[in-house]
Amino acid sequence: METVGSLVDKMSINELKIYMMTKQNERTDVDEKFHADCDMRLAILREQREDLKAELQALIDDVLSGKKKFKLYRQMKMYNEQKYRKSQ
């Protein structure tokens, strides 16, 4: 199962790709083939954006309805613990 964090991470990377591809598509020093390629890639990235949004919404809906639960992980650190040191 994807986590909210992993989905948000994927969404932020996708948004950066959309931003950068848009900037490439605005270039004036390239030919029409380049712009057509950028348009095709932007369409794919935008579809991925919608898929990720739908997946995140489905996860949120499942959590709110009780179908899925988040598992809490506690930190288990053992270093520098004074209570375990031998008296000297």
Image (tube, rainbow, N blue to C red):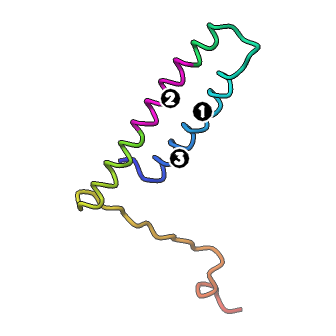
Q: Which residues are magenta?
A: 39-51
The label on residue 45 is 2
Please report whichever mark, 3 or 1, sits nearer to the chain's N-terminal start. Answer: 3
- Pick the quarter of the image with the C terminus: bottom right
Query: Badge 1 local density, few (<14 within 10 Å), some, or many (20+)?
Result: some
Residue bearing the label numbered 3: 9
Horizontal and vertical percent for residue 59?
A: 33, 51
| Name of the residue lying farthest toward the bottom | 87
For marks 3 and 2, the one nearer the N-term is 3
How many angstroms separate mark 3 from mark 1 (CA)? 13 Å
- Residue 9 located left or right of residue 26: left
Which residue position holds label 1? 17
Residue 33: image location, x then y, percent: 62, 7
Q: Amino acid at mark 3?
A: Asp
Point 72% across, 11% down: residue: 30
Is 87 or 71 nearer to us in this picture?
71
**Discs 3/2, front:** 2
Check disc 3 and report its element: helix, strand or loop. Answer: helix
Type of residue at label 2?
A: Leu
Density class for disc 3 (Cα within 10 Å; few <14, some 14-19, many ≥20) is few
Indicate whether residue 50 is drawn in magenta.
Answer: yes
Tell me residue 36's x, y (percent): 57, 12
Residue at the spot 62% in from the left edge and 34% down from the top edge: 19
In-image side of 39 versus 29 (left or right): left
- For the residues bearing labels 1 and 2, Cβ distance under 8 angstroms: yes
Q: Are marks 3 and 1 in contact (CB under 8 Å)?
A: no
User: What residue is rendered at 63% in x and 73% in y?
Assistant: 79
Q: Residue at x 24, y 62 (%)?
A: 66
User: How far is the residue under mark 3 from the one under mark 2?
Assistant: 15 Å
Looking at the picture, which amino acid does disc 1 mark?
Answer: Lys
Q: Of circles 3 and 1, which is in front?
A: 1
